Image (tube, rainbow, N blue to C red):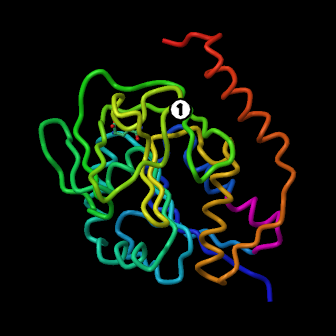
Amino acid sequence: MARKLKISHLFPELLNLYGDSGNILCLSKRLEWRGIDCEVAEVHVGDRPSLSDVDIAFIGGGSDREQRIVCDALLAEHDELKAFVDDGGVLLAVCGGYQLLGESYLMGEEKVAGLGLVDMWTDRKEPRLISNIVIESEISPQPIVGYENHGGRTHLGSGAKPLGRVLYGNGNDGASGEEGCLAGNIVGTYIHGPLLPKNPGVADWLIARALERRFGDATLGPLDDSVELAANAVMAERLLSGKVKED
Ligand code: GLN
């Protein structure tokens, strides 16, 4: 019987900065190319999402205003999300969505409660951290490349580990050298871009974790990633060689 994965795209109309929705297209295509069926279900404000049959959930980034709307909507569904991640559901959250995973984040002067799914919290500082970014991470054979733009500074508690180490750019707070979080099957990151098309190793890590959970078998056939890997390599080389100075 054909294998099938279900992807839940949380609040696509509100959190979709810098092409974040491209991550969904990338996951769908990489499944399709391997003969794995894929269904994408969008969750909008006011919906009562059920994640019980979902394999991968995705939440993108957005402005503070949109993030606040989503935070309120997600807090109302806290138990559903907690049950999903506790059961090993795969969750990818980018930037504004990433910040919501923690205990709290600072919106202006107001400390807003987050979902508390990961031991982390976010405050904010001037200036905004705006840069291309490269990190190294255990979940990707290639350096992970992308773009970051955030006022938030995220701090990991002892119960969380970073997604990776910053090689270029700022990452969680511009000081720790850490970027993102990795907690079981939860990946949080400041990397827009969109993340997955430029970093096929990350896409396949997420897919493999979801296949393992659903079917007990993470085997993934190879794909021709020459174009994706060339794009990745150009950016990594450009930024890490020191030849191009960016502001
Ligand atoms: N509003 C958040 C911040 O500035 C997230 C921004 C984003 O998603 N790019 O920190």
Q: Is residue 99 above or below residue 206?
A: above
Q: Is residue 49 above or below residue 2?
A: above
Residue 147 at what x, y percent from top left?
53, 32
Quarter-of-image position of residue 154: top left
Residue at left offset 24%, top offset 34%: 124
Residue 80 at what x, y percent from top left?
35, 77
Residue at left offset 68%, top offset 47%: 141
| Magenta-tinted stretch | 27-36
Residue 181 at what x, y percent from top left?
42, 51
Which residue was labeled with disc 1? 147
Residue 87 at what x, y percent from top left?
44, 80
Per the image, label 1 sits on a secondary structure element best described as strand
Nearest the viewer among 163 and 30 is: 163
In the rendered image, the quadrant that contains the N terminus is bottom right
Quarter-of-image position of residue 2: bottom right
Give the amino acid at mark 1.
Tyr
